[in-house]
Image (tube, grey):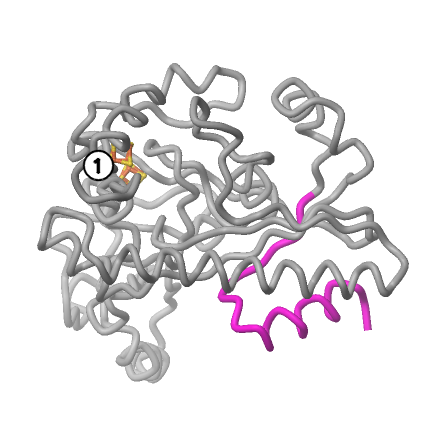
Amino acid sequence: MTVREQVGDLLNGLGVDRWGFADLSSERGALNSEYGTVWDNYPRAVSLLMRLPLAVCEEMQQAGVPTSSYMYYYDVLNARLNDAAMRLSAFLEDCGWRAYPIPASQRMGDDKLAAIFSHRLAARLAGLGWIGKSCCLINPDFGPRHRLVTVLTDAPFSCDEPIKQNCGTCRLCADQCPAGAILGEDFNNNQPLKNRFNGPACDRFLKMARNSIGKRFCGRCIVACPVNNKTKQEQKLIFYLEKAPAEQILPYSLTAGLKSLQKKAQIRLWEDQIPEEGLPDDALFFAVPPALAAAAEATLESANVPYRIIGRLF
Ligand code: SF4
Ligand code: SF4
């Protein structure tokens, strides 16, 4: 069994929803300038993610303010992640490697929002998601509705690759931020955070929240994000029909055309499924709920229609 497989078995048993393996070397300069050389002995990281319940996020969106359930589960997740990170660290140490569990939620001081290490950076490098306009880590399956923890290590595992940013033209988080802290810009590794995020404005709002509800809490940028914020039954898989005649049966035709829909964040395309030459203007698509995907595939195959499933509509 490889180290990755052993780690995966352990984390699966601990109820961790997603995990990934990060090579930190490409960001070493940025890490050293932000945190000093204290982490130089840790060339890699394991990033762990646990989801917040979708229904609890919906409840908070409807309420428009942090609900007691949301705040409660936020703390529960941090505690569970810290426990998982400590167990993973013990496992790696028992194997003879260094391991440092970075606490799931810990600020460096009253005047700084950041923790002692960037969980988001590790998660991005580990391929768990992209950095959204909200500066949150956006996971394709759980959006920003999750918590993260990081275990730094020198264990010799192969690492994952970052995934592509996919906010598109969406800016819901910026529109709904009560502090105007999210500037609506895409993440760019070469530009400073202040180009995208007004940290002091967010911090001032959180201080106001502490005065009124007793906790530094907001979370509106998390519940506003549309990425995969529907239950599985409401999603639809998009089929692309190759060389299909126009009269082909289309159970759910996308009448507006996929090209215009692509501009919205509610469409996620799996680019490796799109033909190299791109999608022709007269291409045919239809979408079905995942539960009907197998039946749709069987219908297309029996009609001898070449097809690909190229994305998700949600
Ligand atoms: S936590 Fe609240 S104030 Fe801070 S960026 Fe998100 S929505 Fe804005
Ligand atoms: S709300 Fe929209 S812009 Fe903001 S992080 Fe989510 S997808 Fe990106």
* The quarter of the picture showing ligand 2: top left
Element marked by disc 1: helix
In the picture, the quarter occupied by the N terminus is bottom right
Q: Nearer the viewer, residue 27 or 234?
A: 27
Q: Quadrant for residue 137, please give it.
A: top left
Based on the picture, tell me whether residue 86 belongs to the magenta stretch: no
Task: Residue at 67%, 74% (x, y): give it.
Answer: 9
Task: Residue at 26%, 80% (x, y): give it.
Answer: 292
Tell me residue 47's x, y (percent): 60, 51
Which segment is the magenta one? Answer: 1-22
Task: Residue at 33%, 23% (x, y): give it.
Answer: 185
Q: Is residue 203 above or below residue 243?
A: above
Tell me residue 6's x, y (percent): 75, 70
Q: Is residue 269 left or right of residue 38?
A: left
Q: Amino acid at mark 1?
A: Ala
In the picture, the quarter occupied by the C terminus is bottom left
